[in-house]
Image: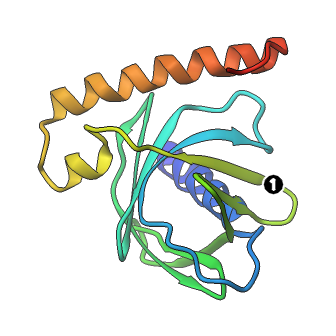
Amino acid sequence: MKILNFLFRFIVINIFLFLNSCNSQEFDIKGDWQIISNSSIPEIMYMEIYIDDINLTTYDERMGLAPTNKYVVKNNDIILTNWTDGKEQNIGRINKLDNLLIISDGSDKLVYRRINESPNLGDLKKERVNQEDFAKAFFKRFEKWKMEREKILLGIPQN
């Protein structure tokens, strides 16, 4: 149960941070996203999220597919309904810059990058791809992400 609470808080804080840096505009946040930074945790866990009209689903390197949470966006705040107890939690303001989705709660910020390749988590949720093919693509993106993160940490310019 502690792991589930930690995972839910991690997801909520990340989404909150991403959403908190928005203006009063409406953003289309639907689609597939991968985490690229988290200002609150130096050693971030690789995660992909899929957002449709009403649901937010996550898949991470350690836990795999997490239960789907319902969400709403109100005044650029993203509010998740916890799948375990049904309670709503405002996780932050959203902002969108080009292919980036930012969730911020004022002190912490999560930044996600749009995933434009398939198979992705949306394909898995829509049953367009099987678990095995999705996992291969996920871990391929994960390996690329690790190399990008290492270059950033070493101060090597990105191409």
Q: Nearer the viewer, residue 114 or 7?
A: 114
Q: Tell whether 39 sits left or right of 143.
A: right
Question: What percent of the width, then of the height, locates residue 59?
Answer: 39, 42
Question: What percent of the width, then of the height, locates residue 110?
Answer: 69, 51
Look at label 1 and name its amino acid.
Answer: Asp
Farthest residue, direction front: 159
Question: What percent of the width, then of the height, locates residue 86?
Answer: 42, 77
Q: Measured along the vertical axis of the image, is residue 23 above or below residue 154? A: below
Q: Residue at x 25, y 37 (%)?
A: 119
Q: Measured along the vertical axis of the image, is residue 38 above or below residue 42? A: below
Q: Nearer the viewer, residue 39 or 3?
A: 39
**Residue underneath mark 1:** 108
Q: Tell whether 126 sits left or right of 5.
A: left
Where does the C terminus fall, quadrant-wise?
Answer: top right
Q: Measured along the vertical axis of the image, is residue 114 above or below residue 60? A: below
Q: Measured along the vertical axis of the image, is residue 151 above or below residue 68? A: above
Q: Residue at x 53, y 55 (%)?
A: 8
Which quarter of the figure has residue 84? bottom left
Q: Residue at x 40, y 44 (%)?
A: 116
Query: How is the protein colored in the picture?
Result: rainbow
Question: What percent of the width, then of the height, locates residue 57?
Answer: 38, 56
